Image: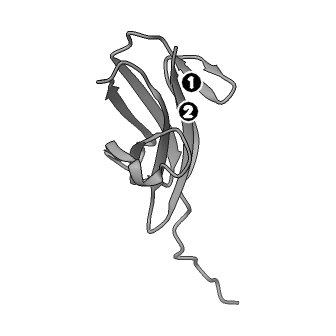
Amino acid sequence: MTQEWSNTPAKPEIKSINTAYPQNGIWVQIPKETHKITFHVEAENTKSVLFWLIPTGTQTWTERKLIGYDMRENQNDNIFSLTLNIDKPYLNDHLYIQVIGEGKVANDIINLSMN
């Protein structure tokens, strides 16, 4: 009997995305006058996480801006974070999160609204 071992790396997987602010439906509600917000991403099989800010609206993907990234520090590290300094009077954007593993990518998106 021959045993086969798979060398296929596991796909990265986002387990959770958290902020200190409440979510109302699909929107994270950020109070006006907020100057910083920190995002925490728990992800498995992930080496690095990219954080993109995309304006709301149609066909805005080309207007995206890479606002930061975080990399795994050791084999047990599965928490990634980014603190966004808000340099405009409002936020009404999408935060697009890409988790990158061994040659594979997964993503998720959360919506940000300043009220």
Residue located beneath label 1 in the image: 28
How many labels were placed on the picture?
2
Residue occupying the point 50% across, 55% down:
45
User: Based on the displayed image, in which of its 4 quarters is residue 110 positioned?
Assistant: top right
Q: Mark 1 falls on what kind of element?
A: strand
Residue occupying the point 56% across, 47% down:
58
CB contact under 8 Å: marks 1 and 2: yes
> Which comes sooner in the sequence, label 1 or label 2?
1
Residue occupying the point 69% across, 25% down:
25
Residue 77 in the image: x percent, y percent?
Answer: 41, 42
The residue sitting at the front extreme is 58
Name the image quarter holding the N terminus: bottom right
Q: CA distance from mark 1 to mark 2?
A: 6 Å
Residue 35 in the image: x percent, y percent?
Answer: 33, 16
Q: What crowding class fits label 2: few (fewer than 14 Cα within 10 Å), some (14-19), or many (20 or more)?
A: many
Residue 8, above or below 80:
below
Q: Amino acid at mark 1?
A: Val
Residue 100, above or below 19:
below
Task: Say left or right for 33 vs 6.
Answer: left
Residue located beneath label 2 in the image: 111
Residue 11, above or below 89:
below
> Is 102 or 109 nearer to us in this picture?
109
Q: Amino acid at mark 2?
A: Asn
Residue 112 in the image: x percent, y percent?
Answer: 51, 28
Q: What crowding class fits label 1: few (fewer than 14 Cα within 10 Å), some (14-19), or many (20 or more)?
A: many
